[in-house]
Amino acid sequence: MELDINKNMNIAKTSLPRVVIIGGGFAGLATINGLKDQEVQVVLIDKHNYHTFQPLLYQVATGGLEPDSIAYPLRKVIKDIPNFYFRLAEVSNIDTNKRKIHTNIGKLKYDYLIIATGSKTNYFGNTNIEKFSMAMKNVPQSLNLRSLILENFEDALLTSNLEERNALMNFVIVGGGPTGVELAGALAEMKKGILPKDYPDLDIRQMQINIVQGGRLLKAMSEKASEKAEDFLIKLGVNIYKSVHVTNYDGYNVETDTDLAFKSCTVIWAAGVSGELINGLEGECVIERAARIKVDEFNKVIGYKNIFAIGDIACMDTKEFPKGHPMMAQPAIQQGKHLAKNLIAQLENKDIRPFKYNDKGSMATIGRNKAVVDLPKWKFQGVFAWFVWMFVHLFSLIGFRNRAVVFFNWVYNYIRFDRETRLIIRPFKNKNKQSF
Ligand SMILES: Cc1cc2nc3c(=O)[nH]c(=O)nc-3n(C[C@H](O)[C@H](O)[C@H](O)COP(=O)(O)OP(=O)(O)OC[C@H]3O[C@@H](n4cnc5c(N)ncnc54)[C@H](O)[C@@H]3O)c2cc1C
């Protein structure tokens, strides 16, 4: 978007304190909910006009869900709330001296600023991997991946070059966290139940799904969850390479720090994220390595008075989490809710309370009837875990319509062994495609 800081954002002048929230993700929305009916003006700014439910992006990429069912209009979130505004804009800079943010649609003054910009894919400085691999951090990227997967099979069907066909059907997923594991499981299910029917004239057995991972799978979860996930994936035919790091990819050759190498037209990079920083903050609050913003136990940005950071972008180092809370939905939601309470308390001259994370556990699904769940006092895997995973994800979605559509899709896919949104709506122009 082009930067034009002279434009007016058309926000009503007010005597109420103005709270500007950058980012309508899990953290931003939790704060919005907590500030409803309060004596504040709230301006939510996001570069997208919708909230994305990132945990289900992999189902969009593999044709299990339509993108609309995991996105929710931000304007609807604030609809009918007096003094709440939404502006579709990208924030480029924070002028902390003048208490203003700069966006591509104008500047805006704040009394309180809440940074909830989340995270972006981290390529750890490897520009080749950044250029040639696929990421899955937002809806457009998931749609690109969906198109590329399907285009690969269309191309594989037509080529008589065996090497090309194998590379087109060879999928390398880098990163064995929940995203990598869930994506691998979904691809394996496509291989088993859908692709052989869609491409009867192609030998789908040649399709390879590989996960390359530095340590064990799901390393943020228990060893049992990790072992079971590995077991499920192997049974689904996924190749798992542990203690291996991908070091380079040129659109065709995948190099690693071992003798292992692949020839693949599709590398999916799910190996890490870093904070989505905005220029303007200075000093010790910016953690360069992870690009996160250091906050105190009240989510206040270190060194600044009325600026707060919550969710993935915030790094609150505590005894239990010396490198900050996990970059997951629950810490984001809980920090957002907590900050709203503290802001209200501050405005009413009451005491504010430090944030305490309530770890409700974590989970990942590997496929039909297969999931792993780690609750604080109970760890379980298999069919029941899968139902729990579905229930939690369904009820975490925003909006009744989204829940209903996702529920219907899941039931339909379960009964019919199908994924009907395997559509190339917006072809992905793979500029890096090799010519054979
Ligand atoms: C593929 C995938 C799967 C995941 N699976 C799980 C899971 O199973 N369980 C789990 O707990 N977590 C999961 N996560 C992580 C979880 O989604 C994040 O931790 C969570 O979204 C963080 O919330 P947030 O509000 O901090 O940021 P986000 O939800 O990322 O929201 C940030 C918002 O800020 C906006 N924004 C960013 N920069 C700007 C700017 N400069 N100007 C304006 N707007 C801006 C963005 O458009 C976005 O709407 C997954 C993430 C991914 C990518």
Image (cartoon, rainbow, N blue to C red):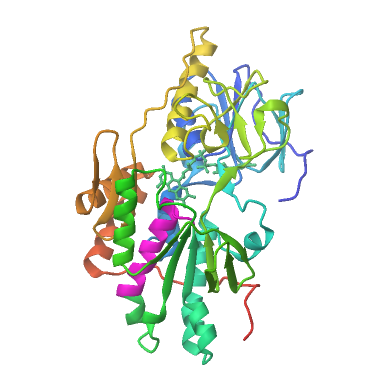
Whether residue 318 is situated above or below residue 73 in the rendered picture: above
Residue located farthest toward the front when viewing the structure as drawn: 259
Q: Give the image location of residue 344, x and y in percent.
A: 49, 16
Q: Which residues are magenta?
A: 175-193
Is 282 in front, or is 174? 174
317 left or right, relative to 248: left
Q: Verify whether residue 33 appears in magenta.
A: no
The vertical placement of 332 against 433, above or below, is: above
Q: Single out the residue that lies furthest toward the bottom.
A: 160
Could you tell me how many numbered marks the image carries?
A: 0
Front-most of residues 84 and 199 = 199
Q: Main SS of the magenta segment?
A: helix
Instruction: Name the image quarter holding residue 347.
Output: top right
Residue at 52%, 18% in the rendered image: 343
The residue depicted at 54 percent of the width and 90 percent of the height is 161
* Residue 259 seen in render: yes
236 and 107: which is toward the camera? 236
The quarter of the rendered structure image containing the C terminus is bottom right
Q: Residue at x 29, y 60 (%)?
A: 232
Q: Quadrant of residue 237?
A: bottom left
The quarter holding residue 5 reads top right
**Location of residue 261 in the rendering, given as x and y in whole percent from the top left corner:** 54, 71
Residue closer to the observer: 306 or 108: 306
Please provide percent x and percent y for residue 375: 29, 37
Please determine whether, in this image, residue 209 is positioned above or below residue 52.
Answer: below
Tell me: 102 left or right of 22. Answer: right
Note whether residue 424 is visible: no
**Left/right of residue 289 with respect to residue 405 in the rendered view:** right
Q: Is residue 180 magenta?
A: yes
Q: Position of residue 37 (x, y in %)?
A: 45, 22
